[in-house]
């Protein structure tokens, strides 16, 4: 039983590389949503990208990664809806090219 405890604690090191990697992925997905018309695929991508970042942050803070993934996915849905509104506002307020 004691040796099992040692093997579990051996892999408990915090690896901070996952936070910038998943942050870069989430930013890339959110910016791609703004510049393209992907529709539902962008919603799924935003949920996964932001969810992975939320899970990485939660694991780094020694919290439950699934809760962080859920919070990040909810933020991805809100960001997708906000991007849709921003795109529509920018489309109708921009001057037409003559």
Image: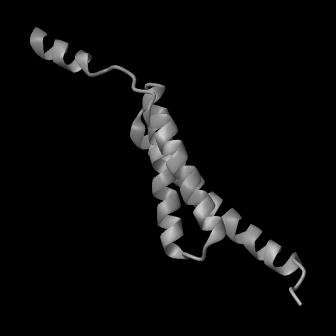
Depth order, front residue of 15/51: 15
| Residue 52 appearing in the image | yes
Q: Name the quadrant of the N terminus.
A: top left
The residue lying at 24 percent from left, 16 percent from top is 10
Q: Quadrant of the C terminus?
A: bottom right
> Depth check: 60 or 70 in front?
60
Residue shown at 90%/80% (left/top)?
Answer: 95
- Quadrant in the rendering for residue 12: top left
- Above or below, comparing residue 83 to residue 73 in the picture: below
Q: Position of residue 86 (x, y in %)?
A: 76, 67
Whether residue 93 sits left or right of residue 32 in the image: it is: right
Q: How is the image coloured?
A: one colour
Q: How many marks?
A: 0
Does residue 51 sit above or below 82 in this rendering?
Answer: above
Indicate the position of residue 57 as horizontal and vertical percent values: 50, 34
- Outermost residue on the top side: it is 2
Residue drawn at x 54%, y 75% is: 38
Image vertical order of residue 94 relative to residue 49, above or below:
below
At a point 48% along the width and 62% down the height, the residue shown is 45
| x and y, in percent, of residue 83 in the image | 68, 65
């Amino acid at each position: 039983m004691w040796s099992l405890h040692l093997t579990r604690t051996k892999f408990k090191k915090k690896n901070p590389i996952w936070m910038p990697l998943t942050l870069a992925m989430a930013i890339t997905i959110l910016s791609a949503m703004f510049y393209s018309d992907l529709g539902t695929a962008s919603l799924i991508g935003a949920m996964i990208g932001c969810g992975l970042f939320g899970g990485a942050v939660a694991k780094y803070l020694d919290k439950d990664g699934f809760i962080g993934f859920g919070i990040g996915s909810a933020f991805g849905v809100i960001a997708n809806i906000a991007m849709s509104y921003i795109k529509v506002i920018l489309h109708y307020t921009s001057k037409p090219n003559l």
